[in-house]
Image (cartoon, helix red, strand yellow):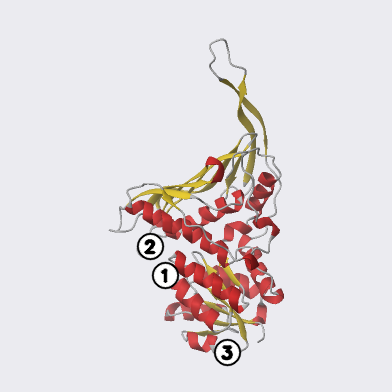
Amino acid sequence: MTSKIGLIGFGYWGTNLARNLARLAGPRWRYLVDASPERRRAATKRYPDVVVTDDLDALLGDDEVGAVLIATPAPSHAPLARRALAAGRHVFVEKPLAMSLADAVALADTADRSGLVLMVGHTFEYVPAVEWMREYIRAGELGDVLYLHSQRLNLGRIQSDLHSFWSIGPHDVSIANHLLGTDARWVAAQGGRYLHDGVEDVMFVTVGYPGDVVAHMHVSWLDPAKTRRTTVVGTRRMLVYDDLRPEARVTVFDKGAEPVEPDGTGVRRYRLRDGAVHVPELSTAEPLALELAHFLDCVRTGTRPRTDGWNGARVVAVLEAADASLRAGGAAVAVPRVEIPGSARTRTDDASLDLTAAAS
């Protein structure tokens, strides 16, 4: 089988994949499949050398196509990925990998058993700023991680087929998992339904990690100001990642609260430390281009992707637990542990970080 490529979906995110695919794959990009006549006309005009069609069977039936990218609505991800894997194709699928943990695990297992690459579009794990933060934490510069909080807010991209945490929350879950290097243990979620019955437009989700580390995530598509920010607080320093500040995407704050000797009353007191602020110099490479180049390289070499199917399953496990917490009125719900086969543990940076001395 040769290395031709097909793209399924030319909507909101598919257009961005197509732009990068045209640059990185060139003539290897053979098919674009989309159900909308209007989007097909736009794609044909923009990419005249690509076969644009609504016939998925034409793509999957072409033995020269070795890899498929899926950028369709979330409920269709698992069925399409299942069909592509069954046809013997390597698969890149946008987040979330599936709408249930059972489907996500089945896809990851199928890819491994078939010797196929399955990669999930957790784009923020390829953001240079996020990768810099991960290495900074791993080097111990932050001290022990205490907690994280993130905001992913905007007015728009309102959806009716899934709530806001399934839609945009996977980004923050994948960032937290990536920075901490460990799996979530429990989730407590609350939300509000304001535009559609049965769909939470705003969600407040707290995710618990080993060592009493918590990550609080606020997502909404009904908010006046666009915000994409993650804060990580450690015992030595604090980090702020602001994706909307290109001049300072990461800011390091040499701040903290340090215990001092108790006074005569036995009350424990703290000295506040307010030190220097540092803005590291970071790569300006487009994360989506880095992500797609990684997928193409994995297809070429057979290397396991950084964001493989098991990575996607771990994120889906948190999303599913958040649903269970919503149904339980916000009570904490345990996150099912994703048992990853030993053969899938091939990356040295998959090992969990020792977040605190008491990490379990």
Q: In front: 274, or 233?
A: 233
Q: Secondary structure at mark 2?
A: loop
Q: Position of residue 148 (x, y in %)?
A: 54, 43
Using the image, determine if residue 254 lies above or below residue 307: above
Q: Which residue is mark 3?
A: 62
Q: Secondary structure at mark 3?
A: loop
Q: Position of residue 279 (x, y in %)?
A: 68, 41
Q: Amino acid at mark 2?
A: Leu
**Nearest to N terminus: mark 3 or mark 1:** 3
Using the image, determine if residue 121 lies above or below residue 223: below
Quadrant, the N terminus: bottom right
Separation (CA) of disc 2 from disc 3: 33 Å
Look at 59% across and 69% down and name the residue there.
Answer: 119
Callout 3–callout 1 Cβ contact below 8 Å:
no
**Does the image show residue 121?**
no
State left or right for residue 352 relative to residue 79.
right
Residues packed near mark 1 inside 10 Å, few (<14), some (14 to 19) or many (20 plus): some
Residue 162 numbered mark, or none: 2
Q: In front: 263, or 158?
A: 263
Q: Residue furthest top?
A: 264
Separation (CA) of disc 3 from disc 1: 25 Å
Q: Quadrant of residue 157?
A: bottom left
Using the image, determine if residue 181 lies above or below residue 258: below
Q: In front: 214, or 167?
A: 214
**Nearest to N terminus: mark 2 or mark 1:** 1
Q: Amino acid at mark 3?
A: Asp
Q: Position of residue 136 (x, y in %)?
A: 68, 45
